[in-house]
Image (cartoon, rainbow, N blue to C red):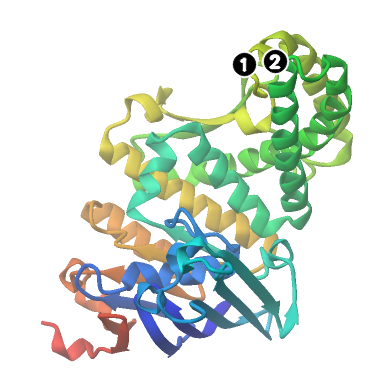
Amino acid sequence: MYLKRLELTNYRNYTRLEIVLPARINVFQGENAQGKTNLLEAIYYLATTRSPIAATDRQLIAWTVENEMIPYARLEGVYDRGGEEHTLEMTLVKEQQPNGSPEQGSLRRQVRLDGSPRRALDIVGRLNVVLFLPESLALVGGAPGERRHYLDVTLCQIDPLYCQALSRYNRVITQRNALLHQIRDRRARSAELGYWDEQLAHLGAQVLARRLWAVGELNRHVAELHPALTGGEECLILSYVNSAVRSRAPGGSAETGGGDSLEIPPLQESLQRALEAARSEEIARGVTIVGPHRDDMRLLANAMDVTTYGSRGQQRTVALALKLAEVALMRDRAGEMPILLLDDALSELDQRRSRYLMQAISRAQQVLITTTDLARYEREFLDTVVLWQVVAGAISPLSAARWP
């Protein structure tokens, strides 16, 4: 699959952008703060309905239109999947409250697929992308939420049912936490938790089953990828840390059916028992402490936990291996390579890792790479790619002949 055309209006520092992208490796060169990362963010946002950088969607609307009557941003992408052309559109509109300033208004998001209005949940996974940012190091060295997010984004792009179960599960957690607060403050009875415990266990088991399956599949891919990135010096093993059973069982089933319904009943029973055992503590704390929202993924390189003890170089290599494993998993499930979005990916890689990465991405139908310095890339590589220059929110073709 590949993105054929991208249009941006009032998005970040792009007042108006129309660009036709070939199904090849595209390299975007520009100084810092010119819009290179914004371009990749826009594509990722269209594909996943979430920004990997912005805390709120409001930040995506160009500040230059803040004082207009109706500040808005619009994104449109035309993409090819399986030989069929589709269009994704997303519009963000700031609606001013009566007698209020634009900052006090609400944000309305409109989503369309092939011209028809859709829920955001319905378009996730239509266009598959894998994004590598300098911030991707947090996937390894950051909090457990970063690793849960990695699994959730990967699974949502290949499994719509998982995305629906995760959304419902998160709503249950919000409502259950509110009830726990009320019980702690003696404004509700603990018996009321019964219904929410059943919902949490039912939906949590579905989420957990698919995560265990995904970790098993990712393990299969990193077993090949990580040794190649480290010259055979390290072997990476992933393990899923389940808050319900307090154990660190390796991976999950490597079988394709690892998340099938046959596995869900025992997981549901395990969650139900864990909730009953933790009830007193949860009421005292006013928060749900058991469930997939409290789980983690452990990363062991040669039996060492790289999350805690890995050097920056090791963590970057592990993050790269995880991203390439994500690519492989999406390829296996979708039958096509996802679009690869690489933001300054070579900045801290040595020559061997850089060459391996270039070899790995060459198998993708479309790759978008950003860089401040084309000198980081070998001339033979630059002769095979499409070069673009990014300056102050404007993108234009760049000839390789201009670079020595």
Mark found first going from the N terminus, 1 or 2? 2
In which quadrant is the C terminus drawn? Answer: bottom left
* Residue highlighted by disc 1: 285
User: Disc 1 on helix, strand or loop?
Assistant: helix
**Rendered residue at 53%/79% (across/down):** 75
Tell which of 152 and 118 is nearer to you.
Answer: 118
- Give the quarter of the image for residue 194: top right
Viewed as shown, does residue 28 lie left or right of 162?
A: left
Tell which of 97 and 36 is nearer to you.
Answer: 97
Of the residues shown, which amino acid type is indicated by label 1? Arg
Mark 2 and mark 1 in contact (Cβ < 8 Å)? yes
In which quadrant is the N terminus drawn? Answer: bottom right
Q: Position of residue 99 (x, y in %)?
A: 54, 68
**Rendered residue at 81%/29% (across/down):** 201
Crowd rating for badge 1 (residues with CA inside 10 Å; few <14, some 14–19, many 20+): some
Viewed as shown, does residue 41 lie left or right of 152?
A: left
Crowd rating for badge 2 (residues with CA inside 10 Å; few <14, some 14–19, many 20+): some
Q: Real-space Cα distance between discs 1 and 2? A: 8 Å
**Rendered residue at 67%/39% (across/down):** 211
* Residue highlighted by disc 2: 184
Q: Position of residue 189 (x, y in %)?
A: 83, 16
Of the residues shown, which amino acid type is indicated by label 2? Arg
